Amino acid sequence: MNDDNNNYNYKKYELLPSPITVNGHTVYKIKALKSFANIAKGETGGAVSSEANLSHFGCCWIYDNATVVGNAKVYGNAKVYDSAIVADNAQVYDCAKIGGNAVVKGNAQVYDCARVLENAVVYGDSKIRGLMRVYGESHVNDENWE
């Protein structure tokens, strides 16, 4: 079997062929190639700039109208949903959840079981981790929370 076939076997999603524009970024909606966690094969999700934004491993997923752009990465069992945006070089991983109209950008990291919800914005070199919850109209920049 060639590498292309081997690579396809581990993929859990594909990019839909027609790009869309979200906040000035060209993105592609994702579609599940297999069932995992609460995702059914064939289900469409949010949007990404490229496959580099969402890992094919673990149960991580981008739902609804959520968007992950730039060099941002979502991996592990993280979930990004509603109309949330993860951008720049931000990372969301482990069992973290980003939802509502929340924005995580810059070099921010959200991990462990942390949540960024509603209209919260996390940016700079912030690290939101553990059981931390950031929500409402909160803005967090260059802070480390546990």
Image: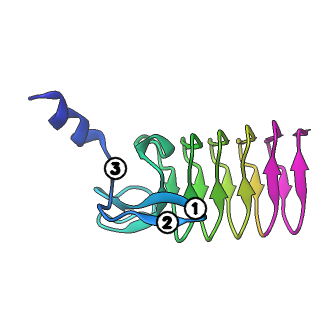
Q: How is the image coloured?
A: rainbow
Quarter of the figure with the C terminus: top right
Q: Is residue 65 above or below residue 131?
A: below
Element type at mark 2: strand
The kind of residue tagged 3 is Lys
- Of badges 3 and 2, nearer the viewer stands 2
- The image position of residue 51, as x and y in percent, is 41, 45
Q: Is residue 42 above or below residue 124?
A: below
- The image position of residue 21, as x and y in percent, is 49, 66
> Which is more N-terminal, label 1 or label 3?
3
Q: Residues within 10 Å of mark 3 (few under 14, many from 20)?
A: many
Q: Give the residue at mark 1.
A: 24
Q: Give the residue at mark 3.
A: 12
Image mark for residue 21: 2
Tag 2 near tag 1, CB within 8 Å: yes
Q: Which residue is painted at 65% across and 64% down in the image?
A: 84
> Which is more N-terminal, label 2 or label 3?
3
Tell me, yes or no, whether the highlighted magenta stretch contains residue 24.
Answer: no
Question: How far apart are the alpha carbons under marks 3 and 1?
Answer: 27 Å
Element type at mark 3: loop
Q: Nearer the viewer, residue 132 or 69?
A: 69
Element type at mark 1: loop
Q: Residues within 10 Å of mark 1 (few under 14, many from 20)?
A: few
Image mark for residue 110: none
Q: Residues within 10 Å of mark 2 (few under 14, many from 20)?
A: few
Magenta stretch: give its range. 119-146
Q: Which residue is painted at 91% across and 39% down in the image?
A: 143
